[in-house]
């Protein structure tokens, strides 16, 4: 089975702190994604990557950056966390050619105080 | 860009009844329509999908229908069971080469009452 692992299930950070969210997939997928999930807003794409060192902005990239140094790992970075970034963050991966199916991790719930 | 509207936002049904969730999309170029189920504390998981060359697809108790002319698609769950209780998301995507954007609806929280 495909496994997408997010390193932290729950994080509590203070305003202004730098935050790293790590995601690792074990299926050699080229494509990886970071989504943000908020009640009533569904899943919104922050960034995605279709290859090592490649990244593209999604719908809500402001305040975030990403890093993909290895194929299996995709990191989301909040340079200076703010309270409006309190949310559930979901990482996903998709296979070659990417017909559309995504495999999601279990999520990282971030609270910024 | 693509816009996906999903209704209803919440749905309660009695065990054994059917549940229907509807979505509309705006981009006529979209031709891949998946449905995801998210159980409490877990990430979304694909349960069924349909491509534009097909009008209906079934998998046991779940089915999806697509009307490309009207730009809407629906999820049908028959003989609902308590384990069907979850949040369901529809999505749409342009399957063209280089297209990576999967746009999600806002979700439907389904509660199946025993």
Image: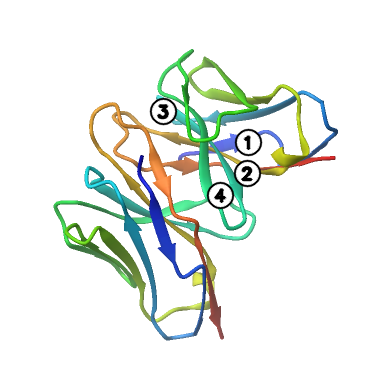
Q: Residues within 10 Å of mark 2 (few under 14, many from 20)?
A: many
Label pair 4/2, CB-CB below 8 angstroms: yes
Q: Residues within 10 Å of mark 1 (few under 14, many from 20)?
A: many
Task: Indicate which disc residue B18 carries.
Answer: none
Q: Is residue A46 above or below residue A101?
A: above
Task: Indicate which disc residue B43 carries.
Answer: 4
Q: Which residue is mark 1?
A: A6
| Of the pair B25 and A3, the residue shown nearer to us | B25
Q: Is residue B28 above or below residue A59?
A: below
Q: Mark 4 vs mark 3: tell me if same chain.
A: no
Task: Indicate which disc residue A107 carries.
Answer: 2
Q: Nearer the viewer, mark 2 or mark 3?
A: 2
Residue A41 place in picture, x, y as percent: 56, 52
Chain on which label 4 sits: B
Q: Residues within 10 Å of mark 3 (few under 14, many from 20)?
A: many
Quarter of the picture holding the C terminus of chain B: bottom right
Residue A10 visible within the image: no
Residue B87 place in picture, x, y as percent: 53, 62
Residue B58 place in picture, x, y as percent: 25, 66
């Amino acid at each position: 089975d495909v496994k997408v692992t997010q390193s932290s299930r729950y994080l509590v950070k203070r305003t202004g702190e730098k935050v790293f969210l790590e995601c690792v997939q074990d299926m050699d997928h080229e494509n990886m994604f970071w989504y943000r999930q908020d009640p009533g807003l569904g899943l919104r794409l922050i960034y995605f990557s279709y290859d090592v060192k490649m990244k593209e902005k999604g719908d809500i990239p402001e305040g975030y950056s990403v890093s993909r140094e290895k194929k299996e790992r995709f990191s989301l970075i909040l340079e200076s966390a703010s309270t409006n970034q309190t949310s559930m963050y979901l990482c996903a991966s998709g296979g070659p050619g990417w017909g559309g199916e995504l495999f999601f991790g279990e999520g990282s719930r971030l609270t910024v105080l | 860009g693509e816009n996906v509207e999903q209704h209803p936002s919440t749905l309660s049904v009695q065990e054994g009844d059917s549940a229907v969730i509807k979505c509309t999309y705006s981009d006529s170029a979209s031709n891949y329509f998946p449905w995801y189920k998210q159980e409490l504390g877990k990430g979304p998981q694909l349960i069924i999908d349909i491509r534009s060359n097909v009008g209906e697809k079934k998998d046991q108790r779940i089915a999806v229908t697509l009307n490309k002319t009207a730009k809407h698609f629906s999820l049908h769950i028959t003989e609902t069971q308590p384990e069907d209780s979850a949040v369901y998301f529809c999505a749409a995507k342009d399957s063209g080469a280089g297209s990576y954007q999967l746009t999600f609806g806002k979700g439907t929280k389904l509660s199946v009452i025993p």
